[in-house]
Amino acid sequence: MLEDGNALTKLAHLKTGKVRVRFDRRIPVFMDSCSVILLHPTHRYRKNPVLPHTFVSSIFMKIRGMVSEKVFNALIVEDQQLVRQGLMLIMKQHFTGVRLYEAGDSVNAFRILSQYKIHIVLLDIGLPIMGGVEIAEKILKEYPSVKILVVTQYSGEALIKNLLRTGVHSFIFKNSAPNEIREAVTTVLDGKHFIPEVLKSALIPMTHIPAVAFSRREAQILLLLKMGRSSKEISERLQLTEYTINSYREAMLKKTKTGNVAQLISYAYENGILG
């Protein structure tokens, strides 16, 4: 438990949402991980006011300069509800002026983009129906003023290079700290690019890496290869000749500079092609 009344009383008034909090220099403030209790030295109060943890978090984040009052609209596009809700919570904690919208797939994402003035999109690249690179390209083409912050668990260099070529503004990883997410959003809204430190060193040797894109047919074959299907089984499934399937496979190996199907599948996972 920490006693720090004098430090907090430097802020005579602190407005958080619609609630105004006054810190009295004569009243010690005791803090723990769950609540803040204000104790009057004469104990004249019948009940000691207790503030909930989420409210306390916003107070101390405000004191430390960790909360922004920027007013903007943000769209979070993520198919996993748990991750989506977590990102929304982080955004609410760090940006008091944000209006949040959410979508679990590309169809709903573009519906929201067509209905509202969205300033920034936090985009998961492992979405169903449409791939992340394709979504980013379409957003930037149809809504050029929108900033795109890619949220990913993949760090494959070819994927990063492809996304940079589309013009996305930032990358963050799904295991990023909330402060890094806040910094990324703030930087992008200020018209700059944000690249995590872990990626900056990787961007220098990336110039020799070819931008790899798979056609829909290649993606179909790749998925079936991942499932352990043979060329014969894939040819019967897709109603193509076995020779055609082998040609596609060899083309993908050459394109990705991999030596066998196992390496090809590993490459696809690292670059977000296979989720």
Image (cartoon, helix red, strand yellow):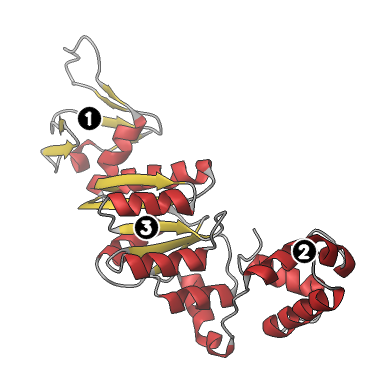
Q: Nearer the viewer, mark 3 or mark 2?
A: 2
How many numbered dots are placed on residues in this image?
3
Q: Residue at x 45, y 79 (%)?
A: 165
Q: Circle 1 is placed at which residue position? A: 28
Q: Crowding at label 3, few (<14), some or many (≥20) Cα neighbours within 10 Å?
A: many
When asked about the image quadrant of residue 263, the answer is: bottom right
User: Label 1 to label 3, Cα distance in Å?
Assistant: 43 Å
Q: Position of residue 19 (x, y in %)?
A: 17, 30
Percent x, y for residue 270?
Answer: 65, 68
Residue 96 visible to an observer of this rendering: no
Of residue 91 and residue 28, the one placed in the foreground of this image is 91
Rendered image: mark on residue 51: none
Q: Looking at the figure, which quarter contains the N terminus? A: top left
Please give the residue where the numbered disc 2 appears in the rendered image.
238
* Callout 2 amino acid: Leu
Q: Image check: 114 left or right of 6?
A: right
In this figure, which residue is indicated by the disc labeled 3? Answer: 121
Q: Position of residue 77 (x, y in %)?
A: 44, 52
